[in-house]
Amino acid sequence: MENQNEYNAEEIFSKALRAGRRTYFFDVRETKAGDYYLTITESKKFTNEDGTFYFKKHKIYLYKEDFDEFNNSLKEICDFIIDKKGAEVISEKHDKDFDSKKEKEKDESSESDNNDEEKDFADVDFENDDQ
């Protein structure tokens, strides 16, 4: 069971970020001494065999004296990932139709490029304008 004091801690500011089956909660709370700290909670939804669901939660407590280093480390690691892998989300590869969708996008893109090169501004078909 979680610490009972946590339930009594007053929330000063909260922000939630939904990300698929996960939700991240960023909560500013106040210590007994009157200082603020941050809790970051990851909540992930799971489904039982009977259709009911439950959540697993993980918490990180971050105190002001660690904000600068935490922020710098987070920025550095995020920049590293973007520099090495780009901003494109590759988790779509887990989609069973990923390859066919990617191939279709590729084909549509090359057709669009070819059509753009072949079209002239004067070449307009008004008969098919309703489609």
Image: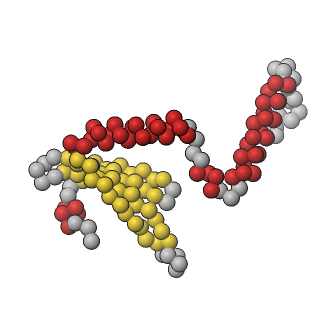
Picture quarter with the N terminus: bottom left
91 or 14: nearer the viewer: 91
Q: Residue at x 40, y 54 (%)?
A: 24
Color encoding of the figure: secondary structure
Q: x, y (%) of residue 98?
A: 69, 52
User: Residue drawn 26% across and 49% down?
Assistant: 62
125 and 108: which one is in front? 108
| Image side of residue 46 versus residue 74, left or right | right
**Residue 128: where, in percent of width, then height?**
86, 35
Q: Residue furthest bottom?
A: 50
Residue found at x 35% / y 61%:
58
Query: What x and y, as percent, mark residue 101?
Result: 72, 49
- Along the horizontal axis of the image, is 6 left or right of 118? left
Compare residues 90 and 41 and report the one nearer the observer. Answer: 90
The mark tally for this picture is 0
User: Where's the C terminus, which quadrant?
Assistant: top right
Residue 57 position, x and y percent, is 37, 63
In the figure, is residue 106 to the left or right of 50? right
- For the point 81% across and 35% down, which residue is it? 111
Task: Using the rendered view, name the quadrant where residue 68 is placed.
Answer: top left
Tell me: residue 112, above or below residue 13.
above
Quick one: 29 or 89, which is closer to the camera? 89
The reply to whether residue 12 is visible in this rendering is: no
Give the answer, above or below, for where 71 lies relative to 54.
above
Q: Can residue 97 be seen in this view?
A: yes
